[in-house]
Image (tube, coloured by chain):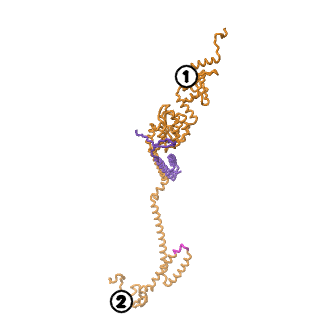
Chain colours: A orange, B purple
């Protein structure tokens, strides 16, 4: 066994070796690509990135300085499978080496897709996509703000849709360059302007394109601006299949700009029709409600009184008529009876005594009448009137009264009896005629049994 | 609230309520008539709102002194 022989061997100092290693490593690995999984990731003050790249058995330290990592569109993070481009740098003071990364790319998918996924994940965690945050898009917005390129096909599409649906709309267009690097901040500014001007809904729109073309709509800057926008906002980017971050943050995602226009433009014809349909539905409802009530009242309505109210009235008239006829018949009957009574009594009395008794009756009646209550006063008056007429009649039957009227009375001169009939006298008999102012003695010369007809006297003769 | 002051949407949602009320089984005839009248007024108001604005397309820009201004923008959709 030979011990270590140092005579022919070069002995390095630490510095010498370090320098040699440095020269060798840095010379051999001045620009390489390294693939591995990110581990022990440390983002110092959000400036320089420190991490390891590892595989199953080994790891290498990586540093990515701010001037390089700021160009990354995706977020470097723990566990990410990446390739990094850079060079090996040896730090002699510590005897360490590391790879200084100048660029990095995700493995298996594009950076943009990764970035999109990462931002989506981040904003999801922040609650930017929460459905309860979504503002309702007004059905009939007065002013519709649109942030898009004013010369583009997108605006034409929107206006065409609007014109096809209604002739009552108000669009406020805020021109933006929807492609290119400045697009995101331009869009943010446009949203600010539309908010300041005051619109009822905002549409941010652009046509289809590659992920790079649509990149502004995947920026965190625009996402947070949309998130804080107080006005309902519709994101209408690209085609049916294109999804952007702004689609998720917006209150509504429209598959295309045309669809966005449909979302804010009521179809006027259809709406008018709908309103009319609602009206007839209400009318039908009211009618059926009335029909129901009619059904409930049907048994009454079917009666002739309701079908022809006059029958009821006529019946009432009829009843009243009968009643009043009954009443007046009764009154007449009563009055008739009384009249007969008076006639009977009157016929039994001679005029003078009758007058005296009637006077006393009158007194009695008057006294009695005074005791009657008001409801009988009328009846009393009637009776009084009747008595008066009776008296008048009696007065008229007084022979003296007859003479006063110009008639004369004939007496048989020999017997002194009144001659009431032609049979009470005869030819050659003497008759005494009584006049109101004297008497005459006359002789009957001729008898005629014919009834005298006063009006035809001269002709008969 | 006065019907005239309602937005289109408010009028529609109130109209919806009215229709719902009208379709209740236990609504009285009197209530039906009151609701019906309100419904007719609401739908007329909604129709009025629908015809309120004229077609107008404007562009929003900033003037030199930084103020927001609008000017008419022609958008030809014939082709």
> Where is residue A41, by image quadrant?
top right
User: What's drawn in magenta, residue-wise?
Assistant: A373-379
Camera-nearest residue between A297 and A455: A297
Q: Which residue is situated farthest in the top direction here?
A: A1
Instruction: Name the quadrant of the C terminus of chain A.
Output: bottom left
For label 2, the SS is loop
Magenta span dominant secondary structure: helix
**Which numbered marker is on residue A33?**
1
Camera-nearest residue between B42 and A393: B42
Q: Which residue is situated farthest in the front direction here?
A: B64
Image vertical order of residue A238 relative to residue A33, above or below: below
Is A375 within the magenta? Answer: yes
x then y, percent, for residue A436: 43, 88
Label 2, on which residue?
A: A445
Q: Which comes before the other along the chain, label 2 or label 1?
A: 1
Is A144 within the magenta? Answer: no
Task: Name which residue lies at 50% across and 46% down.
Answer: B8
Residues packed near mark 2 inside 10 Å, few (<14), some (14 to 19) or many (20 plus)? few
For label 1, the SS is strand
Camera-nearest residue between A90 and A222: A90
x then y, percent, for residue A315: 46, 63
In this picture, residue A77 sits left or right of residue A398: right
Instruction: Name the quadrant of the N terminus of chain A.
Output: top right
Q: How many marks?
A: 2
Image vertical order of residue A448 relative to residue B16, above or below: below
Residues packed near mark 1 inside 10 Å, few (<14), some (14 to 19) or many (20 plus)? some
x then y, percent, for residue A106: 54, 26
Task: Name which residue lies at 54% across and 77% down.
Answer: A369
- Circle 1 chain: A
| CB-based contact (under 8 Å), mark 2 and mark 1 | no
């Amino acid at each position: 066994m030979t011990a270590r022989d140092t005579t022919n061997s070069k002995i390095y100092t630490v510095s010498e070796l370090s320098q040699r290693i440095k020269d060798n490593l840095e010379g051999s690995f001045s620009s390489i690509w390294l693939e591995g999984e990110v581990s022990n990731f440390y983002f110092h003050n959000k400036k320089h990135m420190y991490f390891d790249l590892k595989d199953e058995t080994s790891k290498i330290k990586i540093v990515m300085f701010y001037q390089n990592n700021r160009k990354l569109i995706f977020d470097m993070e723990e566990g990410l499978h990446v390739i990094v481009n850079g060079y090996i740098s040896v730090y002699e003071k510590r005897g360490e080496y590391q790879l200084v990364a100048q660029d990095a790319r995700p493995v298996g998918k594009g950076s943009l897709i990764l970035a999109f996924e990462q931002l989506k994940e981040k904003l999801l965690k922040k609650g930017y996509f929460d459905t309860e945050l979504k503002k309702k898009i007004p059905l009939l917005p007065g002013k519709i703000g649109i942030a898009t390129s004013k010369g583009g096909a997108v605006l034409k599409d929107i206006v065409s849709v609007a014109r096809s649906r209604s002739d009552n709309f108000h669009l406020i267009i805020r021109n933006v360059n929807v492609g290119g690097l400045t697009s995101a901040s331009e869009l943010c500014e446009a949203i600010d302007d539309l908010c300041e001007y005051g619109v009822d809904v905002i549409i941010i729109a652009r046509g289809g394109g590659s992920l790079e073309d649509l990149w502004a709509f995947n920026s965190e800057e625009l996402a947070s601006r949309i998130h804080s926008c107080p006005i309902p906002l519709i994101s209408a980017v690209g085609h049916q299949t294109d999804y952007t971050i702004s689609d998720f943050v917006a209150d509504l995602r429209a598959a295309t700009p045309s669809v966005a226009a449909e979302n804010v433009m009521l179809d006027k014809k259809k709406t008018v029709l709908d309103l009319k349909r609602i009206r007839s539905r209400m009318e039908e409802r009211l009618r059926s409600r009335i029909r129901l009530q009619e059904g409930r009242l049907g048994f009454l309505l079917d009666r002739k009184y309701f079908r022809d109210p006059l029958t009821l009235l006529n019946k009432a008239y009829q009843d009243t008529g009968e009643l009043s006829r009954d009443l007046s018949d009764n009154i007449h009957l009563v009055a008739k009876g009384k009249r007969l009574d008076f006639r009977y009594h009157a016929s039994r009395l001679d005029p003078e005594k009758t007058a005296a008794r009637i006077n006393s009756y009158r007194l009695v009646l008057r006294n009695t009448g005074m005791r009657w209550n008001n409801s009988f006063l009328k009846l009393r008056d009637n009776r009084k009137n009747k008595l008066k007429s009776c008296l008048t009649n009696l007065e008229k039957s007084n022979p003296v009264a007859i003479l006063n009227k110009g008639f004369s009375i004939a007496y048989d001169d020999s017997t002194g009896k009144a001659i009431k009939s032609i049979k009470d006298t005869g030819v050659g008999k003497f008759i005494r005629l009584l006049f109101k102012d004297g008497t005459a003695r006359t002789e009957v010369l001729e008898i005629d049994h014919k009834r005298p007809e006063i009006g035809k006297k001269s002709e008969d003769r | 609230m006065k019907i005239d002051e309602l937005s289109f949407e408010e009028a529609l949602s109130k109209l919806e309520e009215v229709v719902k009320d009208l379709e209740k089984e236990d609504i009285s005839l009197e209530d039906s008539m009151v609701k019906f009248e309100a419904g007719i007024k609401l739908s007329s108001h909604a129709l009025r709102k629908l015809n309120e604005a004229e077609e107008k397309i404007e562009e929003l820009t900033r003037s030199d002194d930084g103020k927001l201004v609008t000017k008419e923008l022609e958008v030809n959709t014939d082709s």
